[in-house]
Image (spheres, grey):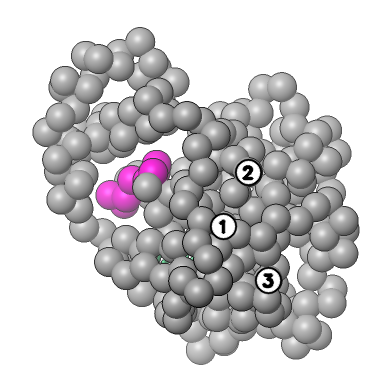
Amino acid sequence: MRKKKTITRREAIFAGLTSAGALLLSGCLKKAPPTYGNILRMGDDLTYMAQRGLLSQRALAMEYQKSDITSFPATDNGDPADPANKKVYSKTYQDLQGNDFKDWTLSIEGSVAKPGKYSMDDLKKLGERRQITRHTCEEGWSAIAEWTGVPLSALLKHAGILPAARFVSLYGFDNYAESIDMLDAFHPQTILAHTMNGDKLPARHGAPLRLRVETQIGYKSVKYLQRIVVTDKFIDPNSDIPEGWSWYTGI
Ligand SMILES: Nc1nc2c(c(=O)[nH]1)N[C@H]1C(S)=C(S)[C@@H](COP(=O)(O)O)O[C@H]1N2
Ligand SMILES: [Mo]
């Protein structure tokens, strides 16, 4: 399922705490992503600033052992290769999949010194990290898998992010997208995963490449990656905020 538009209990609690939080953190709130004046969304500022301010910025999400790996449901939110699913269908993606993604490239654009396109081989040359982590979906399930991929930091360094750059948006072929800030983009466990449990990333889990951002809830981990755009200003490419979703969902 695509994320549902519900206000979670956690959001409601944080909204209640917002006035106290705003008082405590008013010095840094200016730097938080905008909430468009939405009262409930003000809870986001508190979560964001609390996590950014109180926790070590390099703290790692828990990593597990091979024996902890569980079955992993695919959300099947929509297969971009399926013409019957008009909302997510991409002819380009279908063609790429038809050729086993041999012609697939990931484009990096925006506030970078060297915008360009990377093939899977180009990306793999930039480095590798393997991690066994828990994915937590906002709908209430979680699952553990081993992910292997290229650190997003390595790609950003290779493309040369410009000094004013602050956010990174990642777009999937199904028109799904999310943005993260530079702290999460450069977090050592934030990887572009091409391998899941030792096998090529399965179609249902976002082939050929997906984001893993282990510091946040599952919906930030964009599947079927097509394009990465580095921006100086905050953008919310999937309209999370006006649709009632938290932009920052630290776990
Ligand atoms: N491109 C894309 N990425 C996506 C989604 C999506 O619909 N499209 N759903 C998100 C949500 S809500 C979850 S829980 C995970 C699910 O990953 P899975 O299908 O591998 O279980 O992918 C996330 N990434
Ligand atoms: Mo999810």
| Amino acid type, residue under disc 2 in the picture | Pro
**As drawn, which residue projects farthest toward the left?**
16
Q: Amino acid at mark 1?
A: Arg
Dot 3 amino acid type: Thr
The main secondary structure of the magenta stretch is loop
- Residue 141, numbered label: none
Q: Tell me where the magenta segment starts and ends, as one range.
A: 243-250
In the image, taking residue 218 as reference, residue 94 lies left or right, namely right
Label 3: state its secondary structure.
Answer: strand
Kindly identify which residue carries mark 1.
212
**214 falls in the magenta region:** no
Within the magenta stretch, is there residue 248?
Answer: yes
Is residue 211 among what the camera can see?
yes
- Judged by depth in the image, the label closer to the viewer, 1 or 2, is 2
Taking depth in this image into account, of 243 and 8 the one nearest to the observer is 8
Where is 131 relative to 100, above or below? above
Residue farthest toward the top in the current orientation of the protein = 27
Numbered tag placed on residue 195 in the rendering: 3
- For the residues labelled 1 and 3, say whether their Cβ atoms are less than 8 Å apart: no
Kindly indicate the quadrant of the structure image that contains residue 73: bottom left
Q: CA distance from mark 2 to mark 3?
A: 17 Å
Rounded to the nearest angstrom, the CA distance separating label 1 from label 2 is 11 Å
Q: Position of residue 67 (x, y in %)?
A: 50, 74
